[in-house]
Every structure is written in C-alpha cells, then in structure tokens.
Image (spheres, rainbow, N blue to C red):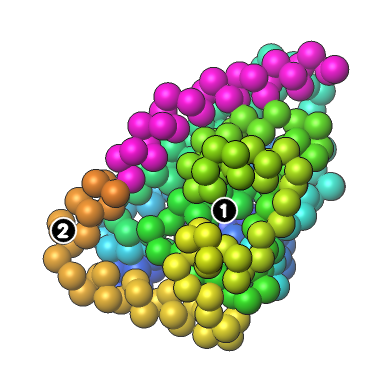
Amino acid sequence: MTDRFDTIALTRAGGITELRIHHQGESARWALWGGLHRELGEAFAAIAADRDTRALIITGTGSSFCAEFDMTSQPPPMGPQSWDVIFREGRALLENLLAIEVPVIAAVNGPAFIHAEIPLLADIVLAAPGAVFADKAHALAGVVPGDGVHVVWPMLLGPNRGRYFLMTGQEIGAAEALALGLVGEVVAGDALLERAREHARAIAARPALAMRYARIALTRHLRERLKAELGYGLMLEGMAVLGGA
C-alpha cells in the first residue's frame, strides 16, 4: 500500500495509518488531470479495505495543505470520454473517503483552497493557525461547484453562507473556522501532527468495533446526501464544461 502513489505518502504503525498528500515531495498541488484527483480515491479505497487500520490521519506537506494547481499537468481535449474519467474519479474521491469505517483525523497544516471539504469530512479536524479554507477551483474559475462542494459546504456553513462561500471564493481563517465549528482545535504548527497522533492513539486503544461502528453511525447522513447529489452535481459541472459557454 505504501509504494503505489506518486502524490500520496502512506505509512502505518500501531494500527494508525497516516496519509500525507504532496507534490514531488513538496506542498501538494492539484493536477488538472490525474494526480491527487485520481490517487486520493484509490488510496481511500485501499484504506477502507485494510482491516488492520484502527484510525486514519490525513495531512499535507510543508506550509500548505493544498492551495495550488499543478499547471504542468494538462488535460486532454475535453469530450464525453474525458469527462467520464472525471465523473468516475470525482465520485470515488468522496465516496471512498466516506467508505472508510474507522475514525478519520485531519491535520490541516496550511491553506486548503482546492477540495478543502476533504479534511473537513474527517471526524476530528485540527488546524494550524495558518490554515485557511476556501473553494478557489470552481465558481471563481468559471466551473460549476458540483463535485461534492455543493453538498458539503452548505451543510457545514448553512445554506446561505454556504452559497456565498462557494460563489465568492471567500477565505475562512483558522480562528473563524474554529468559531464556526468547521474545526475542533487550532494547534501550533509544530505540534499539529503530534496532536493528531494523540487523538489517533486514544482511538486505537478503544474497542475496535465500537470505534468502527461509531464512524459508520456518524457519517450515515453524509453518505446518503452525497450518494443522492454527487452524481447530479458532476453532471451539471460536465454539461457546462462540455458546452464551453
């Protein structure tokens, strides 16, 4: 499981799996084609199938969680077949994350501007003081915010604030995220990962089935909402992209 990916580093010890996203060993960049968009879904599926994992930590590399695009990765000419790849990867990205049946802890080490909903779907969300949350990849770029962000952000922020957030690209810093209930703790950057590990060790020491079933119970509503609305949002996004207007 540890050597399969170019943009993800996976380690496991004591029943705790750590997933660190990166781009060539540095802060993660989101590829316009493939890259994290494909590999995160694959990694989440592998972790979901790993019965030896008792808790999962998701974090980034360096000073950013994921704030930039990898502009060296250009997509092929967009058509129905190309969008079918995005459609399948987009569903796998979030559905496979929520298919993980052990508690998930996110340690958001810096700005998260691209698919910032991924760490916020964790059960325990920790943020460094320099963490900032925004959606820069959709409406601001002329793209329908339809690949899950249209479900998650209005749930987290409320319908009106969620729509405002997605349509304007508003940035929410760590302190405000804590006040809004998006994150559970703001932790100094040099202590962030160790704090995540403390939570993971505490969870791993509890009865495994109790923690597994707790995760299943607490994510049921999220799974149902995404199952109902994710494909629809991706269809609207694809229609606008393929329409080219």
Dot 1 crowding, Cα within 10 Å, few <14, some 14–19, many 20+: some
Percent across and percent down for residue 4 are 52, 53
Instruction: Give whichever of 66, 111 is nearer the camera.
Output: 111
Instruction: Give whichever of 82, 125 is nearer the camera.
Output: 125
**Magenta part of the protein: which range?**
219-245
Main SS, magenta region, reads helix
Instruction: Give whichever of 222, 33 is nearer the camera.
Output: 222
Q: Does 235 lie within the magenta span?
A: yes
Q: Which residue does the image show at 58% across and 25% down from the upper left?
A: 233
- In the picture of the structure, the residue carrying the numbered disc 2 is 210
- Give the distance between the C-alpha atoms of the residues marked 1 and 2, in whole angstroms: 31 Å
Percent across and percent down for residue 122 are 43, 56
Circle number at residue 140: none
Specify whether 212 is left or right of 189: left
Q: Is residue 180 above or below residue 244?
A: below
The amino acid pointed to by label 1 is Phe
| Mark with earlier residue (1, 2) | 1
The amino acid pointed to by label 2 is Ala
Q: Which residue does the image show at 27% across and 76% down from the upper left?
A: 202
Question: Seen from this angle, which residue lies furthest front?
Answer: 160
Specify whether 56 is left or right of 237: left
Do callouts 1 and 2 mark residues in contact (Cβ within 8 Å)?
Answer: no
- In the picture of the structure, the residue carrying the numbered disc 1 is 5
Q: Report whether residue 58 is seen.
A: no
Q: Secondary structure at mark 2?
A: helix
Give the number of the mark in front: 1 or 2: 2
What is the quadrant of the N terminus in the image? bottom left
Dot 2 crowding, Cα within 10 Å, few <14, some 14–19, many 20+: few
Q: Does 23 lie within the magenta span?
A: no
